[in-house]
Amino acid sequence: MDAGQAGEGNLEIFVIAGRENITPKVQPIGNAVFNVSFVPKHQTNHLIHVTFNDENVPGKIITINILQLNRNHDITNDKDHQLQ
């Protein structure tokens, strides 16, 4: 996730599966770029919601349909997940 254009602030990433929150793994790479991944617990849609300084980031509510469990899902390299 690239937050380089967003400026200084607090980036939060939420992963929600049904009624359960899943803690994503967020690793800083450098220059406000982060590697974000999570391990799903259920075979269902997972909602990834991104906020910056407690405000919703437009276009950054992402749904991923999980078809296979026990697999780490890395959302870092998808161009649609860059903050502007």
Image (spheres, rainbow, N blue to C red):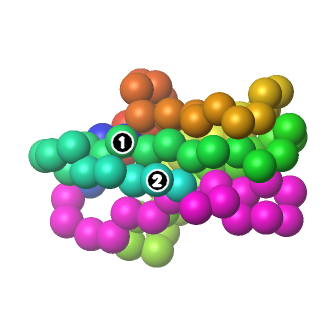
17 drawn magenta: yes
* In the image, residue 34 above or below residue 10: above
Range covered by the magenta-colored residues: 7-23
Q: Quick one: SS at disc 2?
A: strand
Is residue 4 or residue 20 the one in the foreground?
Answer: 20
- Residue 12 lies left or right of residue 60; in this view the side is left
Residue ID for mark 2: 25
> In this figure, which residue is indicated by the disc labeled 1?
35
What residue is shown at x 32% (from left), y 51% (from top)? 27
Quadrant placement of the N terminus: top left
Which residue reaches farthest bottom? 54
Disc 2: CA contacts within 10 A as few (<14), some (14-19) or many (>=20): few
The amino acid type found where label 2 is placed reads Lys
Where's residue 77, x and y in %?
Answer: 40, 26
Residue 84 included in the magenta stretch of the image: no
Q: Residue at x 86, y 38 (%)?
A: 43
**Which residue appears farthest toward the left when viewing the image?**
31
